[in-house]
Amino acid sequence: MSDHLVLISADGHAGPPVATYASYMDPDMGDEFDRFLGEREAWRTERNRSMGLPEDEELVHALFGEEMVDLYTAQEAVRSGGLAGVHDSARRTAELEREGIVGEVLFPDFQNSNEPPWGAAFPYPDVTPRQRRAGARAFNRWLADFCAELPGRRAGVGIVQPHDIETAVHDVHDVRASGLASVMLPTGDPELPPYQSPRYDPLWAACVDEDLPVTYHSGGIPWQGYGPEAMWVSKFELMWWARRPLWQMIFGAVFERYPTLRVAFTEQGADWIPAMLQRLDEQYGSPFERSITERLRKTPTGYWRSNCYVGASFMSRAECDIRGDIGVDRIMWGADYPHIEGTWPHSLAALREACAGCSASEVATMTSETAAKVYGFDLDQLRADADRCGPSLDDVVTPPSPPGATYTDVDYALGKVSGKETGRRLFTSMFPDHQ
């Protein structure tokens, strides 16, 4: 048995420059897409003006501010062009293999001003369901090509817009036929009924038939408008919108009707789950809830344990410490490459900080086995790559040195950075409760 970990990141982002989507667009949307590119430039200009940013600044500056961006871009991996891996297949592979990562679940991007068109995944003003669907389908086609460049090592998550259920079911079948591994559904779209609605039953049935998990990723929220106030509200709410389908689907008896449906909640923290399940269980057990135990044969925690997972992007030590409450076999670690708040280019040190004290079997479950089961990776196929570039289990379960050091401190000791904060520390400056 090899002692190398088959390290899978359950959260990565990819996407080409927006103009590239022209060659992936439905033929009848070509002229409309050309107009969109011009409208998007006007949108970008207004966004930067309202934030007090120079006209040529990218979205990441509005999201994180100059200080955080400067800390991030000062790292050698970024200065040398590592961000190009967001759409450059060879560069991405090189960057991730340096991190020891041999498998990756891929979501759309927006941080690098390369979002799918028309708000297909992230908020954009004044668009129609038809436009969102066209943007989603263009992204899915590009992503299928990108995943095919590294067979078996990239599990793409295709976007499905369920405004019309018959069309959405067709798109689910297309996602599977194109080789993608999961369906991402929108959150925060005021035009969509909530996910407890029975209207979605054909969609759930199609996902079960195609053996496709459903994934909700943070970032899909209603358009809040321009200006720093809108940005502050958006950043505060982006996780809430992504968590909301959990209680909608539980109380909507979705898992009762579709007991083999798998659902993952990615890049929205993991520390909220035990308290939320406790609160949902309290409501389930309340004498004020008429007939709930007749409709739902399990408690909300029971459905979590049988149907749900968390993509625990850049998992913290505090989250790992409550792994038993979340369920070790429910957790999937993610690096969030190439985002500013992710662990790249210091993933091993981040893993060591989060997982120190875990058993080898727990680490393998959270960083490898569960993601393989949910998204369809073949661990035997990945073994040769893991033996070539993956970390040993000892590298991960060995506590950081000196005791109590953060992973950036470990990186200083390893000579990987030069006095710059990175990764999770940037994220916790935005969300101090996510420790």
Image: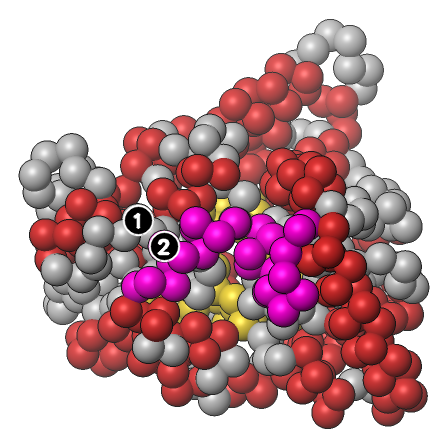
Q: Nearer the viewer, residue 28 or 280?
A: 28
**Magenta segment range?**
51-75
Q: In which quadrant of the rendered image does the N terminus lie?
A: bottom left
Q: On the picture, is 220 further left or further right than 4? A: right
Residue where numbered disc 1 is placed: 421
Q: Residues within 10 Å of mark 1 (few under 14, many from 20)?
A: some
Closer to the chain start, of discs 1 and 2, is 2
Residue type beneath disc 1: Glu
Q: In which quarter of the view is residue 401 placed? A: top left
> Where is residue 387 shown, x and y percent of the image?
18, 75
Q: Which residue is mark 2?
A: 71
Task: Identify the residue at image location x=75%, y=77%.
Answer: 137
- Quarter of the figure with residue 61: bottom right
Q: The disc labelled 2 sits on which kind of residue?
A: Leu
Q: Position of residue 235 (x, y in %)?
A: 62, 42
Q: Residue at x 90, y 59 (%)?
A: 126
Q: Are marks 1 and 2 in contact (CB under 8 Å)?
A: yes
Query: Which residue is more in the foreground, 28 or 229?
Result: 229
Q: Secondary structure at mark 1?
A: loop
Q: Which mark is residue 341?
A: none
Q: Nearer the viewer, residue 155 or 304?
A: 155
